[in-house]
Amino acid sequence: MKTNLLSLLVLACSLTAATSSFAAGAKSYKNVAAAKAPAKTINASEDIDSLGGNQELLEMAEKIKSTSRARIVQERIVERRNTLEFGLSYGSAFGGDSYIKTQALGAQVDYHITPRWSLGARYYDFGNSLTAEGQRIYDDAKATYAAGGRALSVDMDFPLNSAIAVVNWYPIYGKTSFLDMGVTQFDLYLLAGGGNITLTSGNTSVMTAGLGVGIWASSHISARAEVRYQKYQDQLITGSRNLDVVTGSLGLGWIL
Amino acid sequence: MMKSVFSLTFAIAITAGASSAFAVERISTSAWAKTWVQAQDKKASAFSTRALEKKVLGTCEDCDNKDALKKARSLFAEGQFDSAIKSYNQIPRGNTYWLSAVEEKGWAFFRQEDYEKALAQTKTLLAPQFAEVSSTEAFLLQSLAQLKICDYKGVFETHQIFKAKQKNRIMSVQALAKTGWNDSLAQFLKKADSFPLTLADMGETVQTLPLMIYKDKEFQKQALRFKASQHAMALTQNMTVKKALDKVNSDSFTALKNRVQELAQAETDENFKVIQKLNLVEVEAIQRVHTDLELADSMYKTNKFQKVGDDKLVFMDDGRPWIDELDKFEVAAKTCAKGIRRKM
């Protein structure tokens, strides 16, 4: 090792002069036609294979504190500063009244203040139908009544529509390559807000919180998948009742 | 191997894709030969591809970018590195001259002693997509910049990558300088039909042929003559014409081989110089490893990444950049210990 070092030191002396011309010399080959140097033969095993081949030195070099880190800095596909996004969505509610199956057709507008924050307004029109359990209870009540029995009231309070305002926070971003068709950027976001929901019994307030993913397919087209928790009170004959409903929706948007 | 082929295809795809915007009309030699043979049947004339050569090779192709590169080189030579960098930046990503522009921009940053920005350029050049088709100088630039910031581990790693990615190519080009012929050239000539040539025409053969050979006018001229005469020979029944075509074909083949030899020799000479310099850098790195080994952490200067706003996306480099990440690198270095006298 010591012998090796001495010979290396001798070689290193020649480096001082040689390296000063590196950068300038580096560009000198551009004119291929002008290259008239005599033919050189590279001994691959000695000249190339010896490069970076000393594992012991590599381990020593790892102990040196100098190092470099690299990162990639990219522009967002969509400029989301003072930008409006309009969208339509379709979703379904889970939980809540076990007798009712609810679908929601939504329209929304989001004002992106910065890429991290946006304010949104959403309107949902609900379509309701009975679940299998709801249908069974209803049919039983009807059959009992038809048989001359006492009619049982099937007490339900359907959601008709709702309008809410939300704040969206986009803390996580990423990108994905879909079927090698290109790279698509996305943001995961959290949202919270509240508003009004119209039930068959009348209006009541609704609170919501959720999370979603906003996919920026191009500078003008977006797609959103969202899951929200909603809390509101419906009115039954027996009194009011707290409902915890989860809604999932998929939507497409147009960014101005 | 699969990854390597994929990477190369990937590189060709992005360069071919972006170059299409600057494409000039390409002419098929087989179609041209067919027309010539049909005309020959009606009225005999000597075989000449001069008009065709003038049409496909005589026009300035991708002039704006060529001019931008020329201007940048001129500014670089005058030491106006900021202006040179601006000119290099005008060449769009994926253009034929883009890799050269990125490399030379790296040298401009190096000359400005901005080694972090120089390394940011080599991150692109040595990315898996390009490492086999980048020039050997890109490796020298990275190695030297790493030496300048005392990243010796990086120097050794760069040399290992150089060995893994460039050795085959260097040896193939060196052999080509002697013979003027190899399997890749045969493969290319078999497939080539339309001119002017593009990187996509070269396919995987770029790995074992001189860099940018497809842009060389003389190479293209001789390849065009060879292909046109070959197609015409296959179509004509006239033995006298066939004999004349055979001579043209033979002459162009010899000229083609000679040109390939010249280009391969020029690249081999350059490779030889680069390998010598890489060895010198390694020697210096080895020496410094021993001197710097015991230095305290407090002696080093740690640079931080510039803070970026919410409008930008930041991803840490994992060594496998995506296609949209190339030339988007930033490097922050923990540089050489202070107070150590260096010879270079």
Image: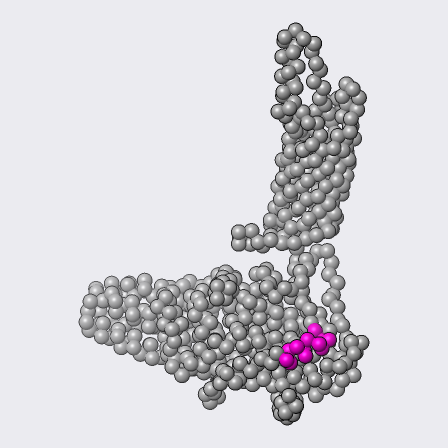
| Residue plotted at (68% across, 40% down) | A227
Looking at the rendering, which quadrant does residue B32 occupy? bottom left
Left or right of A107? Residue B272 is left
Left or right of B83? Residue B165 is left
Q: Position of residue B315 (x, y in %)?
A: 67, 60
Q: Relative to A240, is B96 above or below?
A: below
The one of B342 and B220 positioned closer to us in this rendering: B342
Q: Is residue A63 magenta?
A: yes
The one of B61 and B118 positioned closer to us in this rendering: B118
Q: Position of residue A44 (x, y in %)?
A: 49, 82
Q: Which residues are magenta?
A: A56-67
| Residue plotted at (74% across, 43% down) | A191
Looking at the rendering, which quadrant does residue B72 occupy? bottom right
Looking at this view, name the residue that lies furthest to the top.
A148
Q: Is residue A199 magenta?
A: no
Q: How is the image coloured?
A: one colour
**Residue B122 visible in the current orientation:** yes
**Residue A29 visible in the current orientation:** no
Q: Relative to B168, is A180 above or below?
A: above
Q: Position of residue B89 (x, y in %)?
A: 61, 68
The one of B60 and A28 positioned closer to us in this rendering: A28
| Residue plotted at (43% across, 70% down) | B205
Left or right of A182? Residue A157 is right
| Residue plotted at (77% across, 39% down) | A193
Q: Position of residue A106 (x, y in %)?
A: 66, 34
Image quadrant holding the C terminus of chain B, namely: bottom right
The one of B316 and B310 positioned closer to us in this rendering: B316
